[in-house]
Image (cartoon, grey):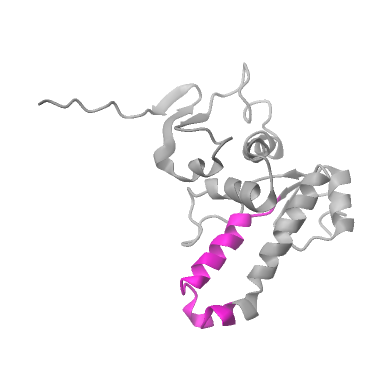
Amino acid sequence: MAARARVDLIDHATFIDDETLDLIAESGAFVAPGLDYIVSTLEYAKEGGFPWLGSYQNFMEKTHYEEELEAAIENVGKAQRRGIKVLIGSDFGFSWCPHGTYGRELTHLVKLVGYKPMDALVAATKLGAQAMRMQDKIGSLEPGKLADLIVVDGDPLDDIPILEDRRNITHVMKGGQFFRAAPEPALVTV
């Protein structure tokens, strides 16, 4: 229904069918699958995080999250192959999927779906800016745009999970000004 109504952004869409994928591709809408929410929910359930549902097996029988993850992985891949603009993020802010863990979503796109690391980074930056209709201000490093960026210790194109660990973020720049820089090395006196 959302695709037929030509909405701009569809969250999750994990059990989407081919006809709907075609409608979304034709309309130019964005999809934000929220892979980390599903992965984190499964991890949390395995650790006993939903005691009112009993065992992990009971949790799975009631929620079918493993099937949802399988469908999401397959359908995000189909969406990418159709040229649908897939975004990162969705459903953060839970104890098992807290704010500040967005890097996991990039890792899932690469390791589970098969994205190239650069495509995952573009989903998080350029496509995110387009979805917010702010591509003239943010989303890429170009003259005239806000200089909001992070500098990481390492190359996410070689090792996308480095973005999951905040300790790898050495600098944060907002509007062209540094708000956090790497600490100066301590002087050691002998």
Residue toward you, 172 or 138: 172
Report how many numbered discs are placed on residues in the image. 0
- Say left or right for 126 vs 49: right
In the image, farthest residue toward the left: 190
Question: What residue lies at 53% left-to-right and 81% top-to-bottom?
Answer: 53
Res 138 visible: yes
- Say left or right for 147 vs 123: left
Residue toward you, 5 or 115: 115
Q: Position of residue 85 (x, y in %)?
A: 75, 42
The verdict on residue 44 being magenta is yes
Which region of the structure is painted magenta? 32-59
Question: What residue lies at 75% left-to-right and 57% top-to-bottom?
Answer: 74
- Say left or right for 43 vs 186: right
Q: Position of residue 135 (x, y in %)?
A: 68, 30
- Is the magenta region chiefly helix, strand or loop? helix
Q: Position of residue 111 (x, y in %)?
A: 62, 50
Q: Quadrant of the C terminus?
A: top left
Question: What residue lies at 50% left-to-right and 81% top-to-bottom?
Answer: 52
Question: What residue lies at 85% left-to-right and 46% top-to-bottom?
Answer: 25
Res 29 visible: no
Residue toward you, 80 or 30: 80
Q: Quadrant of the N terminus?
A: bottom right
The verdict on residue 160 being magenta is no
Q: Position of residue 99 (x, y in %)?
A: 49, 51
Q: Is residue 83 above or below residue 181?
A: below
